[in-house]
Amino acid sequence: MSGIADVARLAGVSKSTASRALTGSGYVSDATRDRVVGAARALGYVASTSAVSLATGRTRNIGVIMPYVNRWFFAEVLEGIQASLLARGLDLTLYDAKPGTEGRRRIFQDFLARKRFDGLIAVGLEPAHDEVQRMLEIDRPVVIVVGERGPTSTVAIDDDHAVRRATEHLISLGHREIAFLGGGGGTNWAEVDRRRLSGYRLAMSQAGLDDHAVHVRSDVSLPGGYAAAVDLLGDTRRPTAIVGVCDEVAIGAIIASRRLGIRVPTDLSVVGIDDHEYAEMFALTTLEQVPREQGAAAVDLLVEQLDHPGRPPVDIRLKARLVMRASTAPPDTHESTVAVDMRDHARRRFWDE
């Protein structure tokens, strides 16, 4: 196996010059660097991570911390982060910090303090104040994907804009009885859900529909949206349209409507936010965000901070794009009713299948 001495000999330079050329730890002319890099490639030599770390003070490793790794949004963001890091030759250490777990406590109290990374990307954590402080105390650049503006750089979609656009789309079709579904299920109130609910209420208010605004709480998941929609749509005074806090909740509402015999979009229009991988399958009209782009943008911000320490935090709010499919239409003027006892039937069918 070739070593740095072999590279230096082939390039006709000293070992220290070859090391500087390959690690970037000191000045080397462009011509010399090209000659050393060419020699390394010819010999199949790759500088070890530990050697680069000793020379530069960097680990070339980025820590990524998120509450879930098996949910669509988080998995997509992670793919965007990984692809961008690989393109830069950087490693990734993933921390799975599920809310309320002992594992999460240990990650913030112990693992982050070891500083085995050059920077940290936190995805959708909704961190408590003490967790934010611990991330700042590690004295490494931090970028947050989906979070409030604050002392760190952030990347997210403009949630207020996305929900206002979704609600205004339904209003433009002629809907007045529009319900907002999702958020606040149990004791779980994520800040992103609050922002989306606020955007819905603002759009309804600006259209003079304050008295028609209805928020139905549910867990932010497909089963949560389904269960809440069964109760909402089983009422004879049901809305003509639903804005889901996210696509999973909106898809749950579509499934519930089908079980209750309510036609989408003839009897009920449904719009979501995300452009989830299942959105096309359910012909869901939605506001598209691209999580992989958010992951890549987070890496760009982090690398920029690593290369230029001291630069002020940057807040990026991406605009979601309305994707028209077949789940929205003008309201049907023919009033239909649904038997209330169908709710129990729909629940049984959903959970039994």
Image (tube, helix red, strand yellow):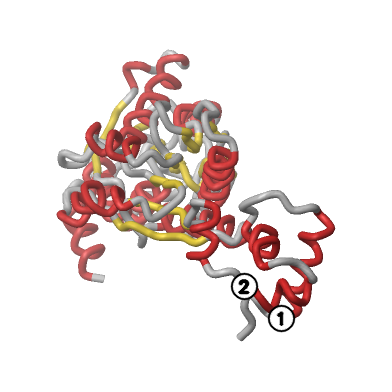
Residue at image position (21%, 47%) is 109
Q: Residues within 10 Å of mark 2 (few under 14, many from 20)?
A: few
Q: Quadrant of residue 124?
A: top left
Q: Of residues 42 and 208, which is closer to you in this image?
A: 42
Mark 2: secondary structure? loop
Residue at image position (35%, 48%) is 249
- Identify the residue under disc 2: 46
Residue at image position (20%, 53%) is 106
> Residue 48, percent across and down?
54, 69
CA gap, disc 2 and disc 1: 9 Å
Mark 1: secondary structure? helix
Q: Please state which amino acid type lies under the numbered disc 1.
A: Leu
The answer to whether residue 288 shows anywhere in this view is no
| 80 to the left or right of 219 | right
Q: Please state which amino acid type lies under the numbered disc 2.
A: Val
Residue at image position (28%, 34%) is 133
- Identify the residue under disc 1: 43
Q: Residues within 10 Å of mark 1 (few under 14, many from 20)?
A: some
Task: Please give the count of numbered marks on the rendered protein.
Answer: 2
Q: Of residues 16 and 196, which is closer to you in this image?
A: 16
Q: Is residue 325 above or below residue 202?
A: below
